[in-house]
Amino acid sequence: MSTSKIRIKKVCAWCGKEFESQKVTTRYCCKRCSELAYKDRKRHEKKNSFERNEEKKQEKKNFAMLDMREFLSVAEVALLLHVTPRAIYYLIERGVLPASQLSARWTIVRRSDVESMLNARPYERKPKVSSITNDENGEPVTEFYTTKEIIEKFGVSNSWVFAQAKRHNIPKVYHRGKTLWSKAHCDRVFAAKPEPPKEEDWISYSEVRAEYNLTHDQLHNYVKYHRLQRKKVGKYTYILRFEIDAILGPPTF
């Protein structure tokens, strides 16, 4: 079988000279450069392995010293728990880990307090979200709508679905990142045609931006993403107050 006559210009990864190769995987211009690179790579691997072993020995030595001490600094607690000092300060500020601040730059922690904190918070495995739910009579719900199906079937907005689901306590489950709503409950709640909104139910864009401290683009994105109802009177655009409240919550003054 004949070899390829194509030659590829490359630069040797060891000596830096240009050479021609028949393969794109060739890295060295000659056998000597290949051998020298191999020896250099092995030297670095041996050096790195030695440094890792020395770090492990020093770490064991540090842990042995910490075992004999009753009071620890924040940096030593971080070393003991394999986290950053900022994480330890976060636990202290939350009151999870008791500590004593003797000065602006001197905080100490009892070793016994660290062990008590760990013993008081064992890991608890959270149960998986159940794909089965029951109605108010205790009967299992087997038929569901997705949020998109409710919007398309009943002609309501995304925010209205969640607002009515919360108000009427519609059973729901989560499946593959989607919210599924009880079909029977949705038919009962959304089948009744809602009364047309009153004049006082509408709020202008400028009023929403002032109450919620939003920019025009932020408000426009909320309206577009959640498909909020809107109407235009002259040069002013209005949306329903209860729909924006269902998304952002009632404004606080």
Image (tube, rainbow, N blue to C red):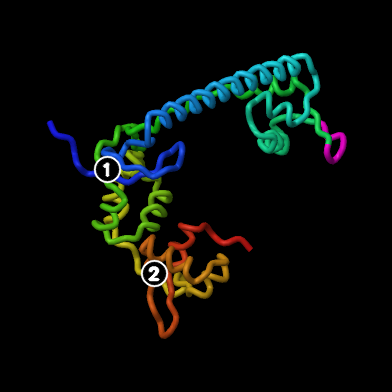
Residue 182: x, y in percent? 30, 43
> Residue at the location (42% across, 49% down)?
166
Please indicate whether residue 160 sits to the left or right of residue 154 in the image: right
Residue that numbered label 2 is attached to = 197
At numbered mark 2, what does the secondary structure look like: helix, strand or loop? loop
Identified by mark 2, the residue type is: Pro
Residue that numbered label 1 is attached to = 144
For residue 251: magenta?
A: no
> Residue at the location (43% across, 65% down)?
221
> Residue at the location (54% across, 21% down)?
46
Residue 2: x, y in percent? 14, 34
Which of the marked residues, 1 or 2, is nearer the chain's N terminus? 1
For the N terminus, the quadrant is top left
- Relative to 208, say whether 188 is above or below: above
> Residue at the location (24% across, 56% down)?
153
Question: Crowding at label 1, few (<14), some or many (≥20) Cα neighbours within 10 Å?
Answer: some
Magenta residues, start to end? 100-105
Please indicate whether residue 220 sits to the left or right of residue 55 in the image: left
For residue 104: magenta?
A: yes
- Label 1 and label 2: CA atoms lie apart by 28 Å
